[in-house]
Amino acid sequence: MYPLIRFAKEVLKFRNAPKLGPLETHVSTHRCWPWDLDPWIELNNGRTLTLYDLGRLPLAMRTGLSAVLRQTGWGITVAGNTTRYRRRIRAFNRFTMLSRMIGWDHRFFYIEQSMWRNGECCNHMLLRMACTGPKGIVPPEEVCAAMGTDPQSPALPGWVQGWIEADALRPWPPHIPEDARAALDAQG
């Protein structure tokens, strides 16, 4: 289940927080609850991605993106991500989340997020997101103009460029292995 109560708490907590520039970092603190755990009694990898929403949505509020989305009727959608896991977060551990926009290209915004505990990075995510409207993806330059910020992105770091290039090589739709084709065909 989506953590709606936690989401509401974050929105209320940061509703009057100082505004952030489009490339500034939103910092938030969270706790790993029993319903966030996997069978190994640590933060579930899928739940990690859901909890990252609790950093991105206040980031959007504080940078003014949420207001622009409401005014224009645009939405936002995740278009891809990659996550690196290095340290465990266990039941009842408190952790700090850092969320920031790195930059954008002609279609997507790139967001970097990380979870920290006791001075160590537990996991790190790079996320590609798009703003969408009735005609599809809204160019980031148009979104920036609506936010009143510079439409020119800073240079994306090499590791982000490398991910973009590697992801472009991945086939879409993915190849269906012969041993799975019958199962998919049976679905209609």
Image: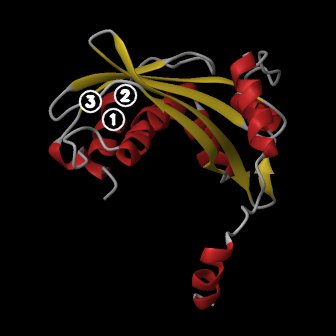
Q: Tell me the quadrant of the picture where the N terminus can be found.
A: bottom left
User: Which residue position holds label 3?
Assistant: 89
* Quadrant of the rendered image containing residue 187: bottom right
Tell me which residue sits at (81%, 44%) in the image. 169
- In the image, residue 49 above or below residue 153: below
Badge 1 element? helix
User: Which residue position holds label 1?
Assistant: 10
Tell me which residue sits at (68%, 75%) in the image. 178
Identity of the residue furthest to the top in this view: 119
Measured in 3D between alpha carbons, the distance from the residue under mark 3 to the one under mark 2, in whole angstroms, is: 24 Å
Tell me the tag on residue 14.
Answer: 2
Q: Residues within 10 Å of mark 2 (few under 14, many from 20)?
A: some
Badge 2 element? helix
Mark found first going from the N terminus, 1 or 3: 1
- Residue 76 spot, x, y in % from top left: 62, 48
Determine whether label 3 and label 2 are within 8 Å by CB: no
Determine whether label 2 and label 1 are within 8 Å by CB: yes
